[in-house]
Image: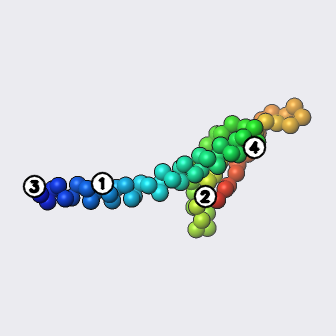
Amino acid sequence: MRHKLLILPVLCSLLQLMFIPIVFAADSCADKAANLQKEHNGKILSIKSANQEGASVCVIDILVPGKNGNPPRKKRFQVKQ
């Protein structure tokens, strides 16, 4: 019984270490998307994390308002994490 009690905290710690970087990356990309949304007065369409040439980037699609009566357009941004 004592061995089972020792394994559970170790397992929980390992699981936390595995998932913490993913959560931070998502928060980072969400923050960057919110800033771009405000900057371009648009709507966020999608947010993804990607690996580009060994670097982590956020790929953010935003629907930006059209100019001079043109319809809104989708614009893609790639920002380093």
Q: CA distance from mark 4 to mark 2?
A: 18 Å
Q: Amino acid at mark 3?
A: Met
Residue 51 is left or right of residue 35, and the answer is left
Residue at the far right: name it.
Answer: 68
Q: Amino acid at mark 1?
A: Cys
Classify 10 Å Cα crowding around label 2: few (below 14), some (14-19), many (20 and above): some
Classify 10 Å Cα crowding around label 3: few (below 14), some (14-19), many (20 and above): few
- Residue under numbered circle 2: 81
Q: Are marks 2 and 3 in contact (CB under 8 Å)?
A: no
- The mark nearer the N terminus, 3 or 1, is 3
- Residue under numbered circle 4: 39
- The mark nearer the N terminus, 4 or 1, is 1
Residue at the far left: name it.
Answer: 1
Q: Which numbered disc covers residue 36?
A: none
- Identified at 27% across, 59% down, the residue is 10
- Residue under numbered circle 3: 1
Q: Nearer the viewer, residue 51 or 31?
A: 31
Point out the frontmost of discs 2 and 3: 3
Q: Are marks 4 and 2 in contact (CB under 8 Å)?
A: no
